[in-house]
Amino acid sequence: LVIYSQHLPKFLGLAILLYVPLIIFTILKVTVNSLYAGEAISRNTSSWLSGILSTGTAFVGILCGHFIIGTTTWIVIQILAMPLRPVKLRPALEAARKKWKTFAGTGLLSTILVFLGFLVCCVGFPILYVLFALVSSVVMMENLRGRAALKRSKTLVMRSLGTTVAAMSIMFLVPVSIYLLIGFFAATTVKSFYDTKEKITTIGQEIGQSDKTQSDEEKNKAKPEIQVMVGGENVLKTDEDNDGKPKLGGINGLIQKTASEILILPFQILTASLTSIILALLYIKTRLVGGETMQDLLAQFENSEEPRRNWQKRIRRRRLEQTGKLTSKS
């Protein structure tokens, strides 16, 4: 919490930046729901588009989650190892960009294994969920991928299993509880709105029916009671007449779903930025418990700060000579 509070703009800005693809997919899903509710597209088109966007959202969400964990691990280690050095997002983002294929492949592999563990045996889900918790940090800081990254994550987790289980439980239960509360709030709000609207409509219909009845009675008094019945059929609209169009219950569900997605997204970004710091600190702790030093990780920060062009190297050399850290002979 201290690290998060001291560098809140950095971590929150990083989360928003890396979640831009997920934000775009969420906007597209809301747009599709709005078009269907406005009868601009048919039910089949809406179903196809929603399915494609849901699949894309799941893939993008997994990739963005691994990206933010790996990038945050880089920044947290830099803050702890070099507290006087200013925090810069560009070197961390550059390092993550170079490993995006590894993040995508290893992240999807770990997610698929966790999902298969849930399908095969419900007990396998929490076990694999905990064992693969540090995969993103391992990919980012140790340049491992695939099975090697999964094994490394398992090794680190087993060094501090109790702490990892507690941390992952909190990271799972707190967001789920928030999402359920948001969904309940959205459903309750939409239901109360439609109930109020239905009551107003019913009262208006009753008043109109009452006025019509009174006017009919006055006409019947003024004219003789003659009833003429023309053979015809009452036409009643059924659900089949509106096939392909959203009905009242369907619109209610669409609004609930859309409101939930819009309200959940900010909380998802906020919790992602906070939980990524927890995983970064957990990665550091498990390394230290095993007696591993941070010296091999510090070399990455030194390399990221080195000048890449010849003129930058010359300027750096002159500055070092002026400060006395480097002699002209060396």
Image (cartoon, grey):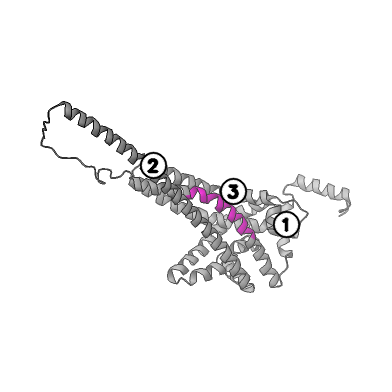
Residue 147 seen in this snapshot: no
- Counting from the top left corner in percent of width and height, residue 75 is at 68, 56
Q: Are marks 1 and 2 in contact (CB under 8 Å)?
A: no
Contact? badges 1 and 3 (CB < 8 Å): no
At 62% from the left and 57% from the top, the residue drawn is 274
Q: Of the residues shown, which amino acid type is indicated by label 3? A: Ile
- The residue to which callout 1 is attached is 79
- Which of the two residues, 106 or 256, is positioned nearer the viewer here? 256
Between marks 1 and 3, how big is the CA–CA gap? 20 Å
Instruction: Choose the circle earlier in sequence order: 2 or 3.
Output: 3
Q: Residue furthest front?
A: 221
Residue shown at 54% from the left, 61% from the top: 107
Q: Is residue 262 magenta?
A: yes
Q: Nearer the viewer, residue 299 or 318?
A: 299
The earlier-in-sequence mark between 1 and 3 is: 3
Quadrant placement of the C terminus: bottom right
Tell me where residue 143 appears, x and y as whole percent. Answer: 63, 62
- Give the residue at x 53% y 67%: 129
Q: Is mark 1 on a helix, strand or loop?
A: helix
| Magenta segment | 260-277
Question: Disc 3 marks which residue?
Answer: 16
Of the 4 image quadrants, the one containing the N terminus is bottom right
Residue 197 is marked as 2
For badge 1, the amino acid type reads Ile
Q: In which quarter of the image is residue 169?
A: bottom right
Q: Is residue 111 left or right of residue 16?
A: left
